[in-house]
Image (cartoon, coloured by chain):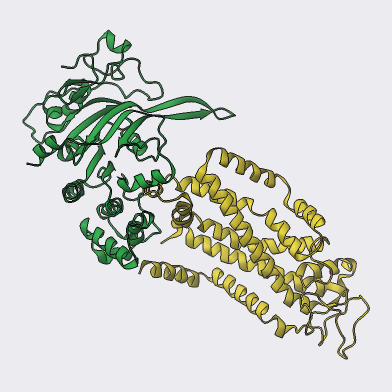
Chain colours: A green, B yellow
Amino acid sequence: MVETEKITAREEVLTVKNLVKHFPIRGGVFKTIVGWVQAVDDISFHVYKGETFGLVGESGCGKTTAAMTLMRLYNPTSGSAFFGGRDILSIRGSELRGLKKNIQMIFQDPYSSLNPRMRVKNIIAEGIKTHHLASGRQDLLDKVADMMKKVGLSADHMYRFPHEFSGGQRQRIGIARALAVEPQLILCDEPVSALDVSIQAQVVNLLKDLQNQFGLTYVFVAHDLAVIKHISDRIGVMYLGKMVEMTDKRSLFNHPMHPYTRALISAIPIPNPELKKNRTILVGDVPSPINPPSGCRFHTRCPIAQPICKEQEPLFEEKSTGHFVACHFAK
Amino acid sequence: MAMKTESRRILKKLVKNPTAMLGIFLLVFFIIVAILAPVLAPSEPGKDPFKMLPAKTAEGKMIWSSNPIAPDSTHPFGVIGKYDVWYGVVWGTRSAFKIGLIVSIISSIIGIIVGSISAYFGGWIDEILMRITDMFMAIPFLVAAMIMTTILGKGLDKVTIALIIFGWMQVARLIRGNILQAKEEQYVLAAKALGIRNFWIIVKHLLPNTIFPVIVQISMRMGSLVITAASLSFLGVGAEIGYADWGTLLNYARNYMMQLDKSWFAVVYPGIAMVLFVLAWNLVGDALRDIFDPKMRA
């Protein structure tokens, strides 16, 4: 069984510690900083080799920002992330470019993520050329053709432009571009949320196939719990820039400890009209990340909140083996 | 293939648009005149053809009087200030192309470099470059060009330099705005994620998606630049005396402004040439804008 293998291997590929990303808000005549958007505020997690780590949460909770910061598309405010023995949040220059061969990203929007004026061949070949992975023109062409076949595209379409493809095919091109540089870790930023449901399954299954074929590790960002449940081995739940719960898939869905996770899981639709479900409906909106609530950030909407939640921020602790929760009343 | 259909689409649109065709026709006409200048108006062998020599009579004698001579068979466009207007108009076409092309291309390159660096890197780099751009924009263009030519001295090459120095700001602003918009696209993030160098991200990803409005602007400016150069020549701070240039001819006509019945040809012929030249570039520019505007695509 694959799963037991993963449990015995347990080699950490990526270890994120206290990652913080705050965006400044500038205002006034002199564009001085008037506030901070606390997009990601002190999150820690680790990803094991060969697994898919799902990062889930509602819009604006900072999951995409976390992925972008790990890809170094944003500069981190503070924190560290260890990958291959190096803190990837502090390296620069040529070392950083070298890192980008090993960590790649798949983007959310298949329409905006491909340069409309570049042929598919050049889109896929760009990374191969940048990291000198081909030994000549013919080798480059072979690699591109091979990559296209691997993601389920016809190599004959190499000289087409992105607008000649459908959304699902475009996402496959984006996957081929990321995969072409032979990375170890791929950060998937909601790779299927812009696609039709029927296409979503195809792309998710393609990602799974590729993972088995190349031994890839994924960090999979999504807001759709059904997709996350399908693809992930371990899951981290984020709320308003904080990681509130992190554990393997089974214990998250069978035994969620954080009230926010419980509310999320109870909101998954069940295709059975007979079954009456006990839904936990959250009241109110997500508070602003500019002025997050004191103490536990979830206390304004939490069904079991107590006075302590307002005053004291709960620690992100391991409550049972491999099951981390940040809640005063987790059990 | 896609690129071919794209260029074929552009070509089809151009052919179908009568005003665009008129513009292209005029442009081709001017290009032919510029190429055939040595045939249409032979210059003295071994001498700089752009330095006009005093016209000669039908018998081959030099004309020494600077009074205007009405058009006749030897001087089809007449003679003004000792110079043959036909010769000036024909060789002036070359001067017009020279000024227009050099100034618009070099100033656009400067504008593209400044604008793209400013927009791509942002922050204090953007702040500094844009304030410099503002400084250049704050100086009235004609005044600045006149001051530059007084400092550098007379001559068409000096005019060219002055026009370049004070002509790059619009392009810089235009490209900056376009890149600010385009750099948020995910394909730019993807290129950054692949570890591609900033220079190549600008050249291969950003410029191809932002440069078309600049091309339209270049063609629009080609015409107006020639007018500006001519007005400098007309004011006497442009081309040196006797340079084959439309503005210089108009400068001679200025001395006979009160006697237009005697010197009309010195105003009308270079004037027509200038009007048609500007018209040609504007029509082509309009057509290009229609083609590149995605909203106009049918």
Please tell me which residue is depicted at 34% across the width and 51% down the height of the picture.
A111
Res A115 → quadrant = bottom left
Res A184 → quadrant = top left
Visible residue check, residue A106: no
Please tell me which residue lies in front, A153 or B261.
Answer: A153
Horizontal relation, residue B134 to residue A196: left or right: right
- Locate residue B246, reporting x and y percent: 76, 70
Please tell me which residue is depicted at 13% across the width and 29% down the height of the picture.
A253
- Locate residue A182, reporting x and y percent: 27, 51
Please tell me which residue lies in front, A272 or A121.
Answer: A121
The quadrant of the rendering that contains the N terminus of chain B is bottom left
Number of numbered labels in the structure image: 0
Res B79 → quadrant = bottom right
Q: Residue furthest right?
A: B65
Horizontal relation, residue A75 to residue B133: left or right: left
Please tell me which residue lies in front, A10 or B268.
Answer: A10
- Locate residue B78, reporting x and y percent: 83, 79
The quadrant of the rendering that contains the C terminus of chain B is bottom left
Q: Is residue B137 above or below residue B72?
A: above
Q: Residue furthest front?
A: A85
Q: Is residue B235 above or below residue A12?
A: below
- Locate residue A202, reporting x and y percent: 18, 50
Please tell me which residue is depicted at 26% across the width and 63% down the height of the picture.
A145
Please tell me which residue is depicted at 51% across the width and 57% down the height of the picture.
B211
Horizontal relation, residue B111 to residue A39: left or right: right
Visible residue check, residue A149: yes
Horizontal relation, residue A208 to residue B244: left or right: left
Q: Residue furthest top?
A: A307
